[in-house]
Image: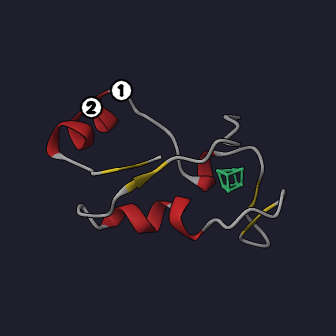
Amino acid sequence: MILPQDALFREEAERFRLRWHCEDCALFDPEGERCSHGYPSERHRAARYEDPEAELLFCKEFTLF
Ligand code: SF4
């Protein structure tokens, strides 16, 4: 699902400490900088969301530590 990232989302993400990036996922291999299940990770990485206009894309396989 792709959603626009608006000011309300950014405020709530900060307030509720939302996690959805690969770097917060138990399946992320930080040494290889890749998804250990082989999924494309470019659009889920934290750096992508430094752009406040970046559309939100959530990974169905995200697994919180
Ligand atoms: S399962 Fe999804 S969120 Fe987790 S590392 Fe792989 S691509 Fe990233």
Q: How is the image coloured?
A: secondary structure
Residue drawn 83% across the image and 59% down it: 36
Please rate how many residues cluster around mark 1, counting C-alpha atoms within 10 Å: few if below 14, some from 14 to 19, many from 20.
few
Disc 1 on helix, strand or loop?
Answer: loop
Indicate left or right for 22 with 58 as reference.
right
Residue drawn 52% across the image and 65% down it: 43
Q: Is residue 51 above or below residue 62?
A: below
Indicate left or right for 64 with 27 as reference.
left
Please rate how many residues cluster around mark 2, counting C-alpha atoms within 10 Å: few if below 14, some from 14 to 19, many from 20.
few
Residue 65 image-quadrant placement:
top right
- The residue under label 2 is 12
Residue that extends furthest to the front in the rendered view of this protein:
1
Q: Give the residue type that dot 1 points to.
A: Phe
Question: What label sits on residue 16 in the rendered view?
Answer: 1
Specify whether tag 2 is near ligand 1 (CB below 8 Å): no
Q: Give the residue type that dot 2 points to.
A: Glu
Residue that extends furthest to the top in the rendered view of this protein:
16
Q: Nearer the viewer, residue 37 or 14?
A: 37
Indicate left or right for 29 with 12 as reference.
right
Disc 2 on helix, strand or loop?
Answer: helix
Residue drawn 24% across the image and 61% down it: 52
Indicate left or right for 19 with 24 as reference.
left
Specify whether tag 1 is near ligand 1 (CB below 8 Å): no
Are the residues flagged by discs 2 and 1 in contact, CB closer than 8 Å?
yes
Q: Is residue 24 above or below residue 28?
A: above
